[in-house]
Image (tube, grey):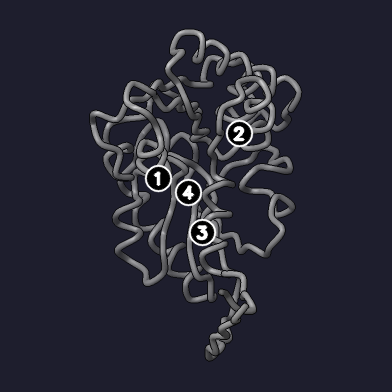
């Protein structure tokens, strides 16, 4: 066996690989949540976007939030991060503009994975999307992350689930994780029964990755969320060195 070795000039990088823009909101971020640093086995850097409340981003789609998001991204870049993500799928609203404003990769919404997933499916299959609030998820959000209008999707929301709504959307200050898990499994169960052609699931909301394992166990389907996306980008920023190849 002949082993070829590649010599490369190493470069020292400052700062954390991943910077995360988070909302100006107050609810518990349990392990698995994008906003909980223990979710990752690598360092991340957070930046709160002041004034970016759930009300303004989700319900109002307030365009005046664009500048604070751009400013937050620029601050993260100046602090040395090598890529910038978000902690709410509805940040898709500003994906193109924020990406254009900085010099590092930007991936603000877990929905960015949908075009990739579509290419892995057979004709006739669908992508199931579970969102925090279906009623305020628009074509503009989909368009801004490259989701084509003809993408076969079944979109279901958590806004009618009592514990999720009161804990996350209404920020009551507490969260019963067991109840939220039961709620999302119930939503996904209904989704797959009503749409048996669903072959992969995307959890849009940054509060739902803690329940990805339960969703997978219930459906047997691949489950994509913010954490799968963040880990994917992190692996591209920190590639493993190999000794050689044949």
Query: Where is residue 185 drawn, in percent x and y?
Result: 63, 19
Q: CA distance from mark 3 to mark 4?
A: 28 Å
Front: mark 4 or 1? 1
Query: Where is residue 82 drawn, in percent x and y?
Result: 50, 70
Q: Which residue is mark 4?
A: 51
Residue at 47% x, 43% y: name it.
110
Front: mark 4 or 2? 2
Q: Which residue is mark 2?
A: 208
Q: CA distance from mark 4 to mark 2?
A: 23 Å
SS for callout 2 = loop
Q: Are marks 1 and 2 in contact (CB under 8 Å)?
A: no
Q: Nearer the viewer, residue 143 or 124?
A: 124
The image shows residue 245, relative to residue 107, as above or below, that is: below
Q: Quadrant of residue 214?
A: top right
SS for callout 4 = loop
The image shows residue 180, relative to residue 111, as above or below, that is: above
The image shows residue 237, relative to residue 59, as above or below, that is: below
Q: CA distance from mark 4 to mark 1?
A: 24 Å
Q: CA distance from mark 1 to mark 2?
A: 16 Å
Q: Nearer the viewer, residue 27 or 34?
A: 34
Q: Which residue is mark 3?
A: 233
Query: Where is residue 221 drawn, in percent x and y?
Result: 56, 27
SS for callout 3 = helix
Q: Are marks 4 and 2 in contact (CB under 8 Å)?
A: no
Q: Nearer the viewer, residue 120 or 133?
A: 120
């Amino acid at each position: 066996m002949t082993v070829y070795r590649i010599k490369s000039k190493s470069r020292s990088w400052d700062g954390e690989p991943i910077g995360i823009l988070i909302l100006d909101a107050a609810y518990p971020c349990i392990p698995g949540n994008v906003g909980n640093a223990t979710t990752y086995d690598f360092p991340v850097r957070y930046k709160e976007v002041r004034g970016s409340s759930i009300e303004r981003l989700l319900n109002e789609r307030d365009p005046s939030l664009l500048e604070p998001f751009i400013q937050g991204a620029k601050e993260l870049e100046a602090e040395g991060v090598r890529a910038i993500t978000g902690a709410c799928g509805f940040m898709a609203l500003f994906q193109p503009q924020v990406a254009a404003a900085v010099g590092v990769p930007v991936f603000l919404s877990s929905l960015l994975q949908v075009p990739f997933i579509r290419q892995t499916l057979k004709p006739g299959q669908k992508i199931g999307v579970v969102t925090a609030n279906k009623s305020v998820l628009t074509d503009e959000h989909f368009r801004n992350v490259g989701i084509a209008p003809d993408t076969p999707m079944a979109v279901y929301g958590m806004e009618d689930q009592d514990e999720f709504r009161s804990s996350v959307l209404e920020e009551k200050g507490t969260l019963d994780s067991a109840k939220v898990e039961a709620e999302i499994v119930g939503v996904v169960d209904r989704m797959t029964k009503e749409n048996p052609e669903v072959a992969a699931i995307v959890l849009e909301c940054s509060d739902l990755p803690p329940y990805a394992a339960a969703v997978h166990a219930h459906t047997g389907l691949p489950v994509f969320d913010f954490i799968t996306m963040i880990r994917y980008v992190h692996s591209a920023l920190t590639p493993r060195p190999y000794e050689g190849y044949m």
